[in-house]
């Protein structure tokens, strides 16, 4: 039987072979996959990022789905185009606290809902203004303070339902944005390789010696759901853990971390101290930007447990992923096999990617 996208990854992990190396090295395939991102929901921001501003630039969206965006707050949170309707200039760079948005090129000004407010030297222009002169509004979806957006996004409810069951008891909407935890890394590897690495704890004893001392590797758990994966890190004795309520299905477990991945590249890492959001932003077939944002729940627990030294873990992961990129570029490698006990998350990702 000839291989097609629909049967490229066997649903039986004991029989399946991994993604062909072309998925990591072929520029045309990269462009095709990235085009599909426009039909998905993507993390925009946590509402606490707007605590001191009326407008923030969502700089990652331009690279992620080729659509520069901003988020505004005037009693209602909106995601708007960051492209001026006059001559296409990018309007906002960074943050703004004003009650309007003004293009720095020719002064076209918009309200925070995207409606055109004013434009100099346009008194004689016929049929102006029209709806075409307003900034485009993009759909938004909010869950416990986390805001998602997209161009033509599909359903995200199944992912949010899964998170509600496991971490909905946390007061995520009250977590506070901590800009000192922001990071931006350039990784010389394909975005899917970075996701592969995230979706298994198999490598922890070999790559992350300090993290391995915090986590009970033998009890590391992986659960699959539509559009995503949950990994649960169980703490070793004496390490920082959640105080889990009785209503949670994890009551009685010593959970050190909940690692959520939502297709294609959103990573929501919940620790006793709060939330680390990791965004995987493909730049080219072999170049990826990784963006970190931190939202603190209990600052007394910062620096402890599985989420204690994320910079070190990231550095170790990047070294591995970049070396793997060089490896899959070899003419001698095409496909491998999965560990049925340790790589179910990677297998699930590959099935989604090729479905």
Image: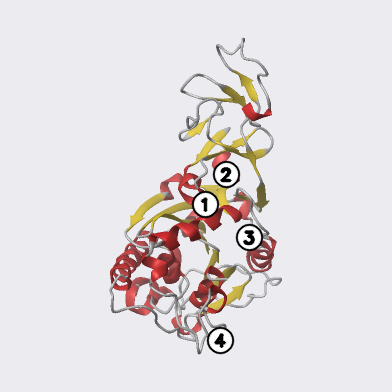
Check the image and name the residue furthest to the bottom.
Answer: 14
Q: Mark 4 sits on what residue?
A: 12
Q: Are marks 2 and 1 in contact (CB under 8 Å)?
A: yes
For image coordinates 31% across by 65% down, the residue present is: 322
**Image coordinates for residue 1, horizontal then vertical, percent:** 53, 86
348 shown above or below 339: above
**Could you tell me which secondary element the residue under label 4 belongs to?**
loop
**Could you tell me which secondary element the residue under label 2 belongs to?**
helix
Could one spot residue 228 in this view of the protein?
yes
Q: Mark 1 sits on what residue?
A: 295
**Could you tell me which secondary element the residue under label 3 belongs to?**
loop
Q: Are marks 3 and 2 in contact (CB under 8 Å)?
A: no
For image coordinates 36% across by 78% down, the residue present is: 334
Q: CA distance from mark 2 to mark 1?
A: 8 Å
Check the image and name the residue furthest to the right.
Answer: 247
Could one spot residue 297 in this view of the protein?
no
Q: Mark 2 sits on what residue?
A: 48
Name the front one of labels 3 and 2: 2
Name the front one of labels 4 and 1: 4
Q: Quadrant of the C terminus?
A: bottom right
N-terminal of the pair, mark 4 or mark 1, is 4
N-terminal of the pair, mark 4 or mark 3, is 4
* Total numbered badges shown on the rendered structure: 4
311 shown above or below 64: below
Name the front one of labels 4 and 3: 4
**Image coordinates for residue 106, horizontal then vertical, percent:** 49, 19
340 shown above or below 27: below
Q: Mark 3 sits on what residue?
A: 170
Question: In this rendering, would 334 be left or right of 86?
Answer: left
N-terminal of the pair, mark 2 or mark 4, is 4
């Amino acid at each position: 039987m000839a291989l097609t996208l629909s049967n490229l990854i066997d649903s039986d992990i004991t029989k399946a072979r991994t993604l062909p190396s072309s998925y990591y090295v072929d520029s045309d395939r990269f462009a095709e996959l990235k085009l599909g991102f426009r039909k998905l929901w993507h993390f925009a921001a946590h509402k606490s990022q707007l605590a001191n501003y009326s407008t923030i630039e969502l700089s990652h969206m331009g690279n992620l789905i080729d659509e520069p965006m901003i988020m505004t707050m005037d009693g209602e949170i909106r995601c708007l185009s960051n492209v001026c309707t006059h001559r296409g200039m990018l309007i906002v760079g960074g943050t703004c606290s004003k009650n309007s948005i003004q293009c720095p090129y020719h002064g076209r000004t918009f309200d925070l809902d995207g409606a055109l407010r004013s434009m100099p030297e346009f008194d004689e222009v016929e049929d102006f203004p029209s709806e075409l002169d307003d900034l485009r509004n993009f759909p938004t979806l909010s869950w416990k303070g986390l805001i998602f957006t997209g161009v033509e996004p599909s359903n995200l409810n199944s992912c949010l339902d899964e998170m509600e069951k496991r971490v909905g008891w946390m007061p995520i909407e009250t977590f506070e944005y901590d800009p000192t935890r922001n990071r931006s890394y350039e990784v010389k590897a394909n975005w899917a390789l970075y996701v592969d690495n995230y979706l298994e704890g198999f490598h922890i004893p070999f790559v992350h010696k300090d993290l391995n001392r915090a986590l009970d590797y033998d009890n590391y758990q992986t659960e699959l759901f539509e559009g995503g994966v949950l990994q649960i890190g169980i703490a070793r004795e004496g390490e920082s853990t959640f105080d889990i309520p009785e209503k949670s299905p994890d009551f009685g477990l010593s959970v050190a971390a909940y690692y959520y991945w939502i297709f294609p590249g959103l990573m929501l890492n919940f620790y006793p101290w709060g939330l680390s959001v990791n965004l995987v932003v493909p730049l080219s077939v072999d170049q990826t930007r990784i963006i970190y944002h931190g939202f603190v729940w209990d600052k007394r627990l910062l620096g402890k447990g599985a989420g204690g030294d994320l910079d070190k873990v990231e550095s170790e992961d990047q070294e591995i992923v970049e070396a793997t990129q060089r490896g899959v570029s070899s003419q001698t490698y095409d496909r491998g096999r999965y560990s049925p006990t340790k790589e179910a998350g990677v297998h699930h990702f590959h099935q989604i990617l090729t479905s």
